[in-house]
Amino acid sequence: MTEIEGIFNELYDSTYQKTLIYVTAKCSKLHDVEDILQEIYTEVYSVLLNKGREYIQNEEAFVIKIAKTKIFRHYSLKQRLSAITLNIAKEERGEGALRLYSGQLCA
């Protein structure tokens, strides 16, 4: 095991329970919790690799900050995808026009 893996394992063990509680409380769907936790700790590992342990002053606060960002992105992406699906359904029914400009959807 490398030094970073050891540091990560310690950080994971010390923050996982509170992070799980936080994410579970904030998620509207229980099946999203596992995916979001994986994203959180993947980013934590990446930060440790790229910036080192010294970058993280308060482990718990650092992990919760990442959790907030991941939860926000997860649900805002779901909302955007939902809106796209609704627009496509309207287009199929002839209720609205859906156009693609430079990779962005426009109603």
Image: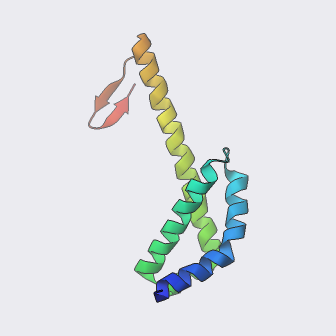
Relative depth, front residue between 25 and 3: 3
Q: Residue furthest top?
A: 94
Which image quadrant for residue 84?
top left
Colour scheme of the picture: rainbow
Q: Residue at x 40, y 78 (%)?
A: 50
The residue shown at (37%, 18%) is 97
Quarter in which the C terminus is drawn:
top left
Vertical comparison of 21 with 46: above or below: above
* Residue at the (72%, 68%) spot, across then down: 18
Image coordinates of residue 32 in percent, x first then y, are 61, 49
Say whether residue 13 is left or right of residue 48. Answer: right
Name above or below for residue 21 compared with residue 99: below
**Rendered residue at 52%/72% (across/down):** 44
Percent position (x, y) of residue 2? 46, 87
Query: Where is residue 65 drawn, in percent x and y?
Result: 60, 66
Q: Where is residue 40 in the image (x, y as percent from the top left)?
A: 55, 64
Above-or-below relation of 16 to 21: below
